[in-house]
Amino acid sequence: MAEMTYLQAISDGLRMEMRRDERVFVIGEDVGVYGGAFKVTLGFQEEFGPWRVIDSPLAETAIVGACTGAAIMGMRPVAEMQFADFVSCAWDHLVTVAAKQRFRAGTPVPIVVRLPSGGGFSGGPFHSQNPESSFAHIPGLKCVCPATPEDAKGLLITAIQDPNPVLFFEHKHLYRRIKSEVPEERYTIPFGKARTHLEGDDVSVITWGAMVYTAGEAAKKLDEDGVSVEIIDLRTVMPWDREAVLASARKTSKVLVLHEDTRTGGFGAEIAATIAEEAFEDLDGPVKRIAAPDCPVPFSPVLEKAFIPQVDDVVAGLRELAAY
Amino acid sequence: MATNTQTEVVMPQMGVSVAEGTITKWLKAEGDPIAQDEALLEISTDKVDTEVPSPGAGVVAQIVVQEGETVDVGTVLAVIAPAGSEAGSEVGGADVGTVTQDEMPPPPATQAAADEAMAAASEGVGDVSQAAEPAQQAPAAPAETPPAPAAAPAGGGDNGRTFLSPVVARIASEHGVDVSQVQGTGTGGRVTKKDILAFVESGASTRATPPPAEEATPQQVSATPPAAPSEVATPVAPQPPPPAVTQAPAQAASTPQAAPRPQPQAVAGEPAQGEAVEPMTAMRRGIAEHMRRSLDTSAHVTSAIEVDMSKVVAIRGKLKQEYGTAYGVNPTYLSFVARATVETLRDFPWINGEIRGDKIVTRNYVNLGFAVELADGKGLIVPVVKNTEGLNLLGMARAVTEIAARARDKKLTPDDVQGGTFTITNPGGYGTFHGTPVISQPQAGILGTYAVVKRPWVVQDELGQDVIAVRAIMNLTLTYDHRLVDGALAGRFLRDLRKRLESWGESDY
């Protein structure tokens, strides 16, 4: 085991797969000479050369298009969007081509698109979004949202090995803030298996990404109230671990769904609806959602704090549910 | 009718088993002038939805029952006053919405007794007509009302915390917990999952034994043969509730002579996983009650016969064009069968008859009922074509088409569903070849007609040799009340009916 930041764990996993499998290559804006905007691929070009660590033009459509073509020809491309927000330029290639190719022609499209996402640093409306629900809605795409360094490495390796297009949402706020023990060897973590971040009996929080830590802080305060909170970290929102969510819902009978993405049509809505459908008779309170309001992410630190769910927001929601 | 005096408009009797009706719309307001037989209001019952015409001319002096309310047959709905009188000015006295003194139940001995009687009535269980006579029976009335099963949710609790979350309701149901006994610690005193689990673990819940089914369903349910056809034709003598009685007991009460209403057999429990629950419509309740009562009343036996319909098929082929062009009428197989049935019933009066008390009633007419499935597939109604003995094939075809259309469009009048003497049901449209339908009480028989299908059939050629031919064959069943009709009689009826159909001549209309 070695202590790594969330960012180092991603680099480690990516490097490991590139060393192991010559088909794996990296392409993106400034990923080569510069080592990527967040330095995930720092030193990669020196080790793997410019043909496996490709600096692309400033054109997301071209990046994903190139990946799709290379994947169809047998390669294992890993694309980096400089910010997750920019992936909308590549929407057509991801949604119309990559997601449907296997259904249409039987050809697997094993691409990974790394998406530095999330806010909390005054990045404003174009550098702070969490667009996972948009892609989770598209059949044929997988969406991964790791919260811990260990998960980030293991899930990235799984993503590279997966024969389907995978969107890998890396939370920027976690890159250097979160540090923990990570196995040094190669390992995979299966998609669709949630992780119990905290065991509890009274209220469940279903969340993923950076909100796992917000929920953890809130749970500490609830613990002082004598309320035991369970936190389920989905790890992947598509596929997502319905069984784990429903088991937790049945156990505590009170569920809070928490995400940093905006509220309406966010993936929390799907989770809440599934709980209502399949665990209705086990509910002892309304399924509650805490999410960002339906507006673009503001620049102003004050406003951004009001926008992104904070520990106090979650504490208030949990107290309300606990008292219900 | 000269309207020198006020005329009361009462809830009409819409069918044998109908005890109440709902006002869906008033077409006139108080003070509006109205002519005799002009549509005054629309009502809905478990049999038909229809307009009620004004029984007199003048002005609508008073509307007693408002839209959306459900009242017993015979209840005064409105008062028509002679033209020139002011709305509401000359009415509102003893005649309106009240009954004369000797019709009224004796006043309750005490207010408490009255309250108890009303509470019993509004429970929806127990014999309401008894509960409405508190003077003699007030002390007994509450005792006759079975206690609500303990498993029922804490509805009616007075603590303002009656909301049960799904999980609490389920646990309460599974463990037979009366939730009102549980101390709630949730918002507003709501009983939470933890509260009820702690209650269950403490052993405090002891399931109250539900009352035996016999107590919950008074003897009213046990079937007795309908007393008289007058019940069909004449509205039950109205016994509207006294003015002091509120609407709730009035809805729950059934008039003594009305057909028995189905009683809830048991409080529906929580649906198990995968089950869905929907309320039963008034029509479905009516059908359920009638089917059960019919089986409890008549000794049902079914005989079947196969009929070679080749001649009917051939004649129908010719007539179809002619009737369609000349009259816009389709001569269906059903109308052929109906026509032949009416002719045959002439020779079998008991099959067109009825057991009434210890007497047998026969008729010189055939009022033929036709079972019609409603368009939404959720109900069945049996409109009656009167005096079918006077209809030729064209008339029969026209009458059947017309009444079935009105049934599906909910345009039937009360008269249309009353007075049947024999019924035909036609499930053959779906390809079924046999069935055992249930008799429409108080009739003695019901004929089932099934699909006409081509089958290999042994016939004799011109030399008298047996040969196999392809023939259009239809099965017919007669389900009869063996109390009145014996098997041999039923067999002869079917034989004669078959003979009529198989030997149908072009001039036999």
Image: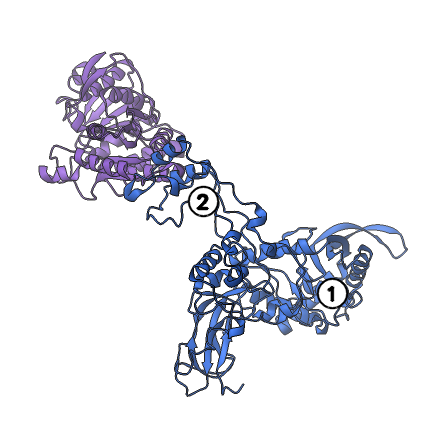
Chain colours: A purple, B blue
Which of discs 1 and 2 lies nearer the camera? The answer is 2
For the residue pair A197 and A137, the one nearer the viewer reads as: A197
Query: Disc 1: which chain?
Result: B
Q: Amino acid at mark 1?
A: Asn
Q: Position of residue B306 (x, y in %)?
A: 77, 54
> What number of labels is visible?
2
Query: Mark on residue B79?
Result: none
Q: Amino acid at mark 2?
A: Ala
- Residue sitting at 52 percent across and 79 percent down? B55
Q: Position of residue B227 (x, y in %)?
A: 66, 65
Horizontally, residue B46 falls left or right of residue B92, namely right
Q: Quadrant of the C terminus of chain A?
A: top left
Horizontally, residue A240 falls left or right of residue A9, namely right
Cβ atoms under marks 1 and 2 closer than 8 Å: no
Q: Which residue is mark 1?
A: B352
Q: Position of residue B66 (x, y in %)?
A: 42, 69
Q: Is residue B461 visible?
A: yes
Instruction: From this view, report whether residue A1 is shown above or below residue B329.
Output: above
Give the mark nearer the N terminus: 1 vs 2: 2
- Helix, strand or loop at mark 1: loop
Q: Position of residue A224 (x, y in %)?
A: 20, 28
Q: Is residue A92 visible?
A: no
For the residue pair A20 and A22, the one nearer the viewer reads as: A20
Instruction: From this view, report whether residue A217 is shown above or below residue B181.
Output: above
Q: Which residue is mark 2?
A: B152
**Mark 2, other Cα within 10 Å: few <14 / some 14–19 / many ≥20:** some
